[in-house]
Amino acid sequence: MLNQLSPRGAQKFFAGGVCRSNVQLPGKVVVITGANTGIGKETARELARRGARVYIACRDVLKGESAASEIRADTKNSQVLVRKLDLSDTKSIRAFAEGFLAEEKQLHILINNAGVMMCPYSKTADGFETHLGVNHLGHFLLTHLLLERLKESTPARVVNLSSVAHHVGKIHFHDLQGEKRYSRGFAYCHSKLANMLFTRELAKRLQGTGVTTYAVHPGVVSSELVRHSFLLCLLWRIFSPFVKSAREGAQTSLHCALAEGLEPLSGKYFSDCKRAWVSPRARDNKTAERLWNVSCELLGIQWD
């Protein structure tokens, strides 16, 4: 079948699921990290189109303003705002949360979209290995700081972007920062497993609150995420007919943010707008609880 597909047909075949929800969002408030580009930008565009007040939380404010201006013009929604958020710096995360909480009395959807991939070994401002610090700990802290506002705005949702790469990941508690042994490919996979475990444990702790949470694999998407890997950039070009556009990659995030009736599936993992298979390591409740406690210790917070 595949050898009979034209490049255009192949792109359509591999585009994956589509968010079918018709839910409109007037009066709803959304925060999306890393929404100045790629999947996050397309997610912001669609939620703005549905009438939400959308906060683009990103490190590069100039890029954010450019994206917001484009989205405002495209959707005719003036309520697309940009705020500085550097997930590699807990001071920036706290400053963003403080400013947002002073500005907004409600928060209905938090989409933890931003991420790094295949970075050479480096550390965040707080001394965390970059993949762990940005992809997991940064969003862990942000969610913690915004959670009361989410609870006050129920029903509310938290969407965490993970990846099919979580299947390769493992949580090495004896070397969480990769100081003894480091592979930038595996470091990304480990951080995506951490996203899965965080979603699982968060869902357990949020039972009965009216806040639900979901993990998402967006698919193999053409985005800036692969910029640190020449090989991946090359492969993305070669296999471009089989790589999703950012708009296609945003569909599962949108599904988990919008689809009605998902509440009983809190804590689950979605790909192509439907539930997907989770690795055994991502279903380990003891590891999820231990990672939660270790994350709190690393960040110096109490989150019971």
Image (spheres, rainbow, N blue to C red):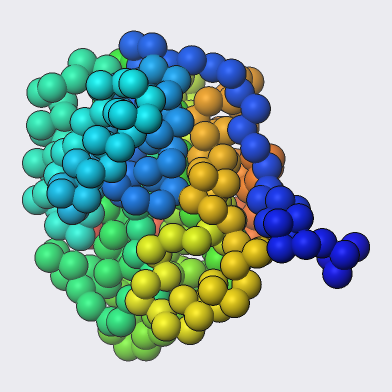
Q: Position of residue 22 (x, y in %)?
A: 59, 18
Image position of 77 (left or right of 39): left
Asked whether residue 202 is in view, the answer is no
Q: Quadrant of the N terminus?
A: bottom right
Q: Residue at x 29, y 47 (%)?
A: 36
* Residue furthest top as drawn: 27
Q: Position of residue 156 (x, y in %)?
A: 42, 22
Q: Position of residue 263 (x, y in %)?
A: 58, 24
Q: Residue at x 49, y 50 (%)?
A: 246
Q: Nearer the viewer, residue 63 or 88?
A: 63
Image position of 61 (left or right of 242): left
Q: Quadrant of residue 33?
A: top left
Q: Residue at x 42, y 83 (%)?
A: 230
Q: Quadrant of the C terminus?
A: top left
Q: Residue at x 19, y 37 (%)?
A: 82
Q: Position of residue 27 (x, y in %)?
A: 34, 11
Asked whether residue 117 is in view, the answer is yes
Above or below residue 241? Residue 91 is: above
Q: Nearer the viewer, residue 129 or 58?
A: 58
Above or below residue 265? Residue 192 is: below
